[in-house]
Amino acid sequence: MVQEGLEVWKKGGKPADLMARARPIEFHEALWNAGETLLSFETGQVSYHDRDRVIRCEARLTVRDRKGKEKTENVAYDVKLDSPVKIMNNPMP
């Protein structure tokens, strides 16, 4: 699901596009909401965290901000399998 959301972002879509799907996904990513462009991504390790009851997916993002500056960041997304599914960038995994 994280990869699905990142593909939508990379293709120029908006988080609201994910909510309009048959199985809605609520995707919370500050970089996306700020209007940054996702140039590329790689998903990494996926693990289950019983204490928080989330699936955590690591990813490496390369983005371009509105001024044209590119940067690469390692991020971790927490996925809650509610309805809708919620994906949140966890700043402190």
Image (cartoon, rainbow, N blue to C red):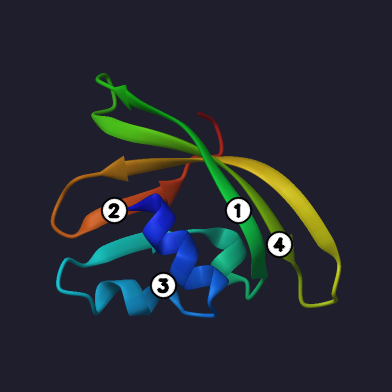
* Sequence-wise first label, 3 or 1: 3
* Sequence-wise first label, 2 or 1: 1
> Pointer 4: what residue?
63
> Pointer 1: what residue?
41
- As displayed, is residue 67 above or below residue 1? below
Report the side of 22 relative to 47 (left or right).
left
Q: Answer whether labels 2 and 4 touch (C-beta < 8 Å).
A: no
* Sequence-wise first label, 2 or 4: 4
**CA gap, disc 1 and disc 4:** 9 Å
The part of the image, by quadrant, that contains residue 12 is bottom right
Q: Where is residue 5 in the image (x, y as percent from the top left)?
A: 41, 62
Secondary structure beneath dot 2 equals strand
Q: Nearer the viewer, mark 2 or mark 1?
A: 1
Report the side of 42 relative to 66 (left or right).
left
> Pointer 2: what residue?
86
Q: Where is residue 6 in the image (x, y as percent from the top left)?
A: 48, 61
* Sequence-wise first label, 4 or 3: 3
Report the side of 23 relative to 19 (left or right).
left
Q: Which of marks 1 and 4 is in front?
A: 1
Report the side of 30 relative to 87 (left or right).
right
* Sequence-wise first label, 3 or 2: 3
